[in-house]
Image (tube, grey):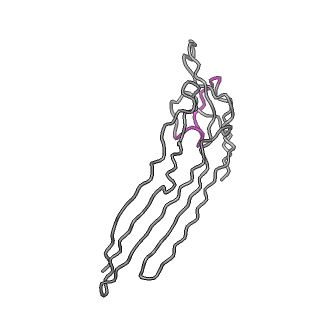
Amino acid sequence: TKSHIPYVQNTSGVGDFVQPGLAVFLTTYDPNAEIFTANNTWEWLGRASGSYTFPADILVSAHFENRSGIPFARTVSATGGTTIPSIAVRVEPIGARRTTNVNILDFRAEKAIRLGAQRLSLRLNFYNMLNVSTVIPENSAYAVWRTPQRIIDGRLFKISGQFDF
């Protein structure tokens, strides 16, 4: 997906309708309103999945997802003015940096047991099988440069069942 958002953003943070960089904002006419505001970035998402049923009603499936990192730009916080006491100034174009791409691999194993016309399915799901610990997203302010805000959950296992009648 190609983003092309050339609009001036509201840099004061007051009156925003949605997240900065994703829609039209109110103009504040401050010095930062036209500095590196255009968002001309690419994002991608790729998925592949497949399953195979072995004899004795044993199903094994896998799902892989590759997602692009989130585009961002460094900012510097300036303080001390009288008209504008503090302001976050973007010091490079949006998309000059990206968070790390996210690669997730999930597996499922399922055993079906037929009980006449009914069916009982026992499942074992493995989420984040590669146990990636990708940071999503990171801070872009210079004072806390690239400190993690959130890390993808570690490997998870889930046991479940389903009864069809």
Indicate the position of residue 48 as horizontal and vertical percent values.
58, 65
Nearest the eye: 8 or 40 = 40
Q: In the picture shown, does residue 33 fall above or below 48?
A: above
Q: In the picture shown, does residue 125 fall above or below 71?
A: below
> Residue at 69% of width from left, 43% of height from top?
40
Q: Which residues are magenta?
A: 18-31
> Residue at 37% of width from left, 60% of height from top?
158
> Residue at 66% of width from left, 43% of height from top?
5
Residue 23, magenta (yes or no) = yes
Indicate the position of residue 64 as horizontal and vertical percent values.
55, 61
Task: State the residue lying farthest toward the bottom.
Answer: 116
Q: In the picture shown, does residue 133 fall above or below 65?
A: above
Quarter of the image with the C terminus in it: bottom left
Judge left or right: residue 163 versus residue 47: left
Nearest the eye: 55 or 31 = 55
Q: Quadrant of residue 66?
A: bottom right
Judge left or right: residue 40 versus residue 125: right
Indicate the position of residue 154 as horizontal and vertical percent values.
45, 49
Nearest the eye: 111 or 14 = 111
Residue 11, magenta (yes or no) = no
